[in-house]
Amino acid sequence: MLNGGTYTPINVPGAAQTVVEGVNNSGVVFGNYTDASGNTHGFIDAAGTFTSIDDPGAYFTTVAGVNDSGQIVGFAYFAPQTTATPEPTSLTLLVIGGVCSLAYCWRRKRPVA
């Protein structure tokens, strides 16, 4: 961070990478950091005290802003919720195919009136 001609690095302790999103009028620094496992967490740095911010269940959280009253805004990414769709068994497909074949053959053998 550059302030009055002085550069001060902002590094969350133990982080593999730190990204500063901004600084509010009270001097609170905020952004996100990536830990050694590759997970991304939001953070605030108030006078050298780092606090992690995580949205429960998210794999990525960042703090996008902190107003002068200390209210935090940000965003998070969640893994898509998927459920397995059961597939019909081979026997079910065989029975359906057989019934359709019989119906087709029966319909073709009917005399035309």
Image: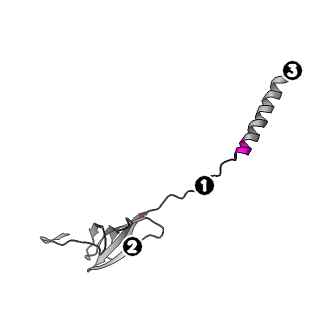
Q: Which residues are magenta?
A: 76-93
Lower sequence index among marks 3 and 1: 1
Q: Which residue does the numbered mark 3 point to in the structure image?
A: 111
Lower sequence index among marks 2 and 1: 2
Q: Which residue does the numbered mark 1 point to in the structure image?
A: 84
Q: Residue at x 70, y 44 (%)?
A: 90
Mark 3 to mark 2: distance in Å?
77 Å
- Callout 3, which amino acid? Pro
Q: Residue at x 37, y 72 (%)?
A: 72
Q: Position of residue 100 (x, y in %)?
A: 76, 34
Q: Position of residue 49 (x, y in %)?
A: 29, 80
**Left or right side of 51 for 97:** right
Mark 3 to mark 1: distance in Å?
47 Å
| Mark toward the viewer: 2 or 1 | 1
Residue 104: quarter of image: top right
**Which type of secondary structure does the marked residue at label 3 adopt?**
loop
Q: Residue at x 26, y 80 (%)?
A: 48
Q: Which residue does the numbered mark 2 point to in the structure image?
A: 53
Q: Are marks 3 and 1 in contact (CB under 8 Å)?
A: no
Q: Is residue 63 magenta?
A: no
Q: Nearer the viewer, residue 38 or 10?
A: 38
Mark 2 to mark 1: distance in Å?
32 Å
**Left or right side of 113 for 61:** left
Can residue 70 be seen in this snapshot? no
Q: Residue at x 35, y 77 (%)?
A: 51
Q: Position of residue 13 (x, y in %)?
A: 29, 75
Lower sequence index among marks 3 and 2: 2
- Callout 1, which amino acid? Ala
- Callout 2, which amino acid? Ile
Q: Are marks 3 and 2 in contact (CB under 8 Å)?
A: no
Residue 47 is tagged as none
